[in-house]
Amino acid sequence: MPGKIRTIQKDISETELGWCQCHEHLFIADGPSRKINSALFMGDEQKSLAEVLLYKKAGGCSLIDAQPYGCGRMAENLVSVSQQANIHIIACTGFHKTEYFSDDEWVFKQTDDTLAAIYLHEIIEGMYSSEHIRLTAKAGVVKCAAIKGEYQANKTYETLFHAAAQAARQTGVPLLVHMDKEADALRVIAFFESYGIRPETIMVCHLDRTKYDYRYHEEVASTGAYLEYDTIHRLKYHSDEKELALISHMVGSGYAGRLLFGLDTSNRRLKSYGANMGLDYILTEFKPLLVERLGANTVNRIMIENPAKFLCF
Ligand SMILES: [Zn+2]
């Protein structure tokens, strides 16, 4: 049977995906995230829709929304935006860092089986809305968050990681892993491999800002996992020139097939919420620089072919 990509409206084939940014946030409900960082609040459907329309106008076809269950995901609004803008959105189940949960007490009480059952339900039957109503829209990715110590950081992370691994193994759905500054991608990949999960179904995110180290990136890419870069125009970390240097190095080392890009948006990176850059930044500003360095074929490979291969199960 040919594989499929699970978008929130329907399953699609690999060839239908098109230009896909692999780690974005269209919505984050008011809650713990906003208290931690005021940039992490996007609760206005009209604004998020306007942003997606800008992205579409620039050539965007699809995106992965990286906000998981229980962390202000606003799944019902993702569905509405996907329908109104006619764009493919791949949603996440799984978990983020525990401080982002709106009911962290609840999370601490779960077992890996009860959490895995929720993740499986969201992939197979449909996601839960903000009001905990069951939707028919399904999740197509399992998100995890790795802090220092990864799956052994503490008892809660251990439970969360095992639950995510169970759901990914049973369904074949790919994994998206947030990497904190001191988290080790190699240990995360090895953990999932111990479950029989192939590295080719794992995306490790943000290493371009958390571990800007060519050798380390080569080592991670050589496992077969995908590296998702989103420190594009995130100037407090580094310049676009430095981002391009890393990308060029990885492509030159033969890893063009292991790269994925996104913007990891917050309200400070979305025009509709008042920022001076938007979800269309890669298409309108960064793509010409990429094409100049890498050529159009490689850029299309990273933005279209790699996401399709990663998402297909
Ligand atoms: Zn993110």
Image (tube, helix red, strand yellow):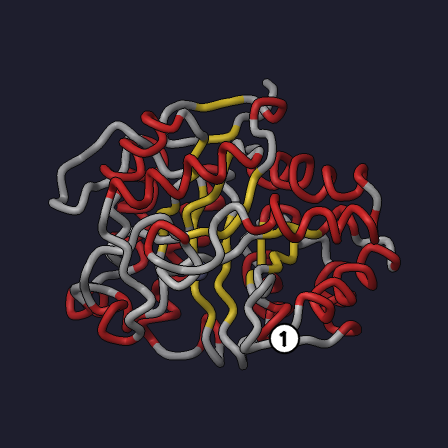
Specify the amino acid type for callout 1.
His
Question: Can residue 312 be seen?
Answer: yes
- Which is nearer the eye, 40 or 142? 40
Which quadrant would residue 90 be assigned to in this image?
top left
Residue pictured at 49% horizontal, 45% vertical: 169
Would you place residue 149 above or below residue 28 in this image? below
Ligand 1 visible in quadrant: bottom left
Quadrant location, the N terminus: top right
Quadrant location, the C terminus: top right
Residue 174 is situated, as x and y percent measured from the top left of the image, at 52, 44
Residue 54 is situated, as x and y percent measured from the top left of the image, at 46, 39
- Which is nearer the eye, 90 or 128? 90
Residue pictured at 67% horizontal, 41% vertical: 306
Would you place residue 75 above or below residue 194 in this image? above
Residue pictured at 33% horizontal, 67% vertical: 39
Q: Is mark 1 within 8 Å of ligand 1?
A: no
Residue pictured at 55% horizontal, 68% vertical: 234
- Which is nearer the eye, 143 or 55? 55
Relative to residue 114, is residue 221 drawn left or right? right
Question: Can residue 196 be seen?
Answer: no
Residue 132 is situated, as x and y percent measured from the top left of the image, at 14, 44
Residue 57 is situated, as x and y percent measured from the top left of the image, at 51, 32
Which class describes the residues within 10 Å of circle 1: few (<14), some (14-19), or many (20+)? some
Relative to residue 55, is residue 208 drawn left or right? right
The residue that disc 1 covers is: 238
Q: Residue furthest top?
A: 1
* Tally of marks: 1
Would you place residue 275 above or below residue 208 in this image? above
Helix, strand or loop status at disc 1: loop
